[in-house]
Image (spheres, helix red, strand yellow):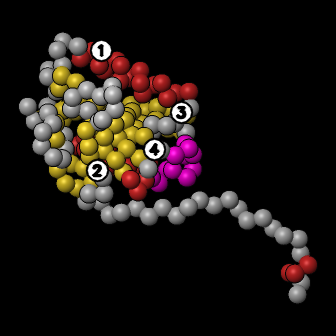
Amino acid sequence: MVSCGAPPVPKPHGYFRIDLPEKAYHPTAPGYPYRFEIPRYALMSRDSSPSAEPWWANIQFPDHKAEIHLSYKPVHYNLGIYTEESRRMAYDHSVKASAIEEENYINPEKRVFGTIYYIKGNAASPFQFYLTDSTRHFLRGSLYIRATPNIDSLKPVIDFLEADAIQLIETLEWAR
């Protein structure tokens, strides 16, 4: 009875519950100059955009409205151009980012070397990387979330998908 006369109290703003699937991976289909493992809940397809080049691909995460764009280029004495372009593209997000952390990646057994960019804050692409063998192959990847950037609500999904991108990086092998 006493509570009926009390003024209404607004409920705090909440976020949707995000159910994340169990991690399980499988190798990519042959036919690319690279191979790696992707999650079973992801789909990989050739990039069909008009500006796409051979061996470009997209890894889609339909349940999370996200994708990793992959662009591949053969190296012909132009590695410096590709690495600088990748760095510039990552730092283009500095307008919205609160920080950008770089991490070098080195796997001499598989001849995979590169840089990973962790882009913090409300950026459209929170994770980018490039990988190379420094003589023949160059692969660049960017994770995009197809939702309004809001780090508070997207952080669990970003962390979940970053782990999948790291799995891609750690299992990468050059096919040719």
Disc number lying in front (2 or 4): 2
- Residue 24 x/y as whole percent: 25, 59
Q: Which mark is residue 35?
A: none
The residue that mark 2 highlights is 43
Q: Secondary structure at mark 1?
A: helix
Residue stretch in magenta: 147-157
Q: Amino acid at mark 4?
A: Ile
Q: Badge 2: few (under 14), some or many (20 or more) residues near its Cα, within 10 Å?
A: some
Residue shown at 44% from the left, 50% from the top = 65
Q: Which mark is residue 81?
A: 1
Q: Badge 3: few (under 14), some or many (20 or more) residues near its Cα, within 10 Å?
A: some
The residue that mark 3 highlights is 97
Q: Is residue 42 left or right of residue 12?
A: left
Q: Is residue 99 left or right of residue 106?
A: right
Q: Amino acid at mark 2?
A: Leu
Q: Looking at the image, tell me whether mark 2 or mark 4 is earlier in sequence order.
A: 2
Query: Label 3 to label 4, Cα distance in Å?
Result: 15 Å
Q: Looking at the image, tell me whether mark 1 or mark 2 is earlier in sequence order.
A: 2
Q: Amino acid at mark 3?
A: Ala
Image quarter hosting the N terminus: bottom right
Q: Looking at the image, tell me whether mark 3 or mark 4 is earlier in sequence order.
A: 3
Quadrant hosting residue 115: top left
Disc number lying in front (4 or 1): 4
Return the residue nearer the eye: 57 or 98. Answer: 57
Q: Secondary structure at mark 4?
A: strand
Return the residue nearer the eye: 32 or 22. Answer: 32
Can residue 108 be seen? no
Q: Which mark is residue 145?
A: 4
